[in-house]
Image (cartoon, grey):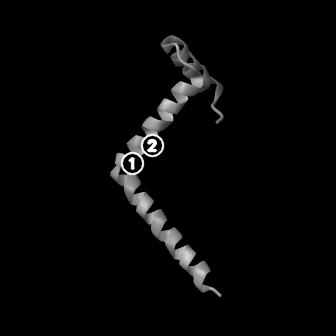
């Protein structure tokens, strides 16, 4: 994962202050974002739209023979 230098430095400082690795802090942040999205109604709607689109595409591939 690439971060702009300023964000990378802030992440490094958070990790240093907490006595943790940058990777550990980044993993925690990513996990929190995923949990937040899973509870977000707008994200759930987007997920449903994407699922429907992919299901339709898969059906077309299956039935195109």
Q: Which quadrant of the view contains residue 45? A: bottom left
In terms of depth relative to the viewer, which is nearer, 35 or 11? 35
Write the residue at 55% across / 22% down: 11
Asked if the residues shown at circle 2 and circle 1 are in contact, with their CB atoms under 8 angstroms apart, the answer is: yes
Quarter of the image where the C terminus is located: bottom right
Q: Position of residue 18 (x, y in %)?
A: 48, 14
Compute the Cα span from label 2 to label 1: 6 Å
Query: Can you identify the residue that label 2 sits on?
Result: 34
Write the residue at 53% across / 17% down: 20
Task: Look at the numbered disc 1 and give the secondary structure of its residue.
Answer: helix
Label 2: how many residues lie within 10 Å, few (<14), some (14-19) or many (20+)? few
- Look at the picture and state if 15 lies above or below 45: above
Q: Position of residue 5 (x, y in %)?
A: 65, 25
Label 1: how many residues lie within 10 Å, few (<14), some (14-19) or many (20+)? few
Task: Look at the numbered disc 2 and give the secondary structure of its residue.
Answer: helix
Q: In the picture provided, is 57 more to the left or to the right than 36?
A: right
Write the residue at 44% across / 59% down: 47
Q: In the picture provided, is 13 more to the left or to the right than 42?
A: right
Q: Which mark is residue 11?
A: none
- Look at the picture and state if 11 lies above or below 37: above
Q: Which mark is residue 38?
A: 1
For this orientation, the residue located farthest to the bottom is 65
Q: Position of residue 36 (x, y in %)?
A: 39, 41
Write the residue at 58% across / 19% down: 12
Q: Which quadrant of the view contains residue 62? A: bottom right
- Look at the picture and state if 62 lies above or below 4: below
């Amino acid at each position: 994962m690439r971060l702009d230098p300023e964000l990378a430095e802030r992440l490094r400082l958070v990790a240093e202050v907490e006595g943790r690795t940058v990777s550990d802090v980044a993993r925690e942040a990513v996990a929190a974002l995923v949990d937040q999205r899973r509870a977000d109604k707008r994200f759930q709607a987007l997920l449903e739209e994407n699922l429907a689109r992919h299901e339709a595409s898969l059906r077309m591939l299956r039935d195109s023979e």
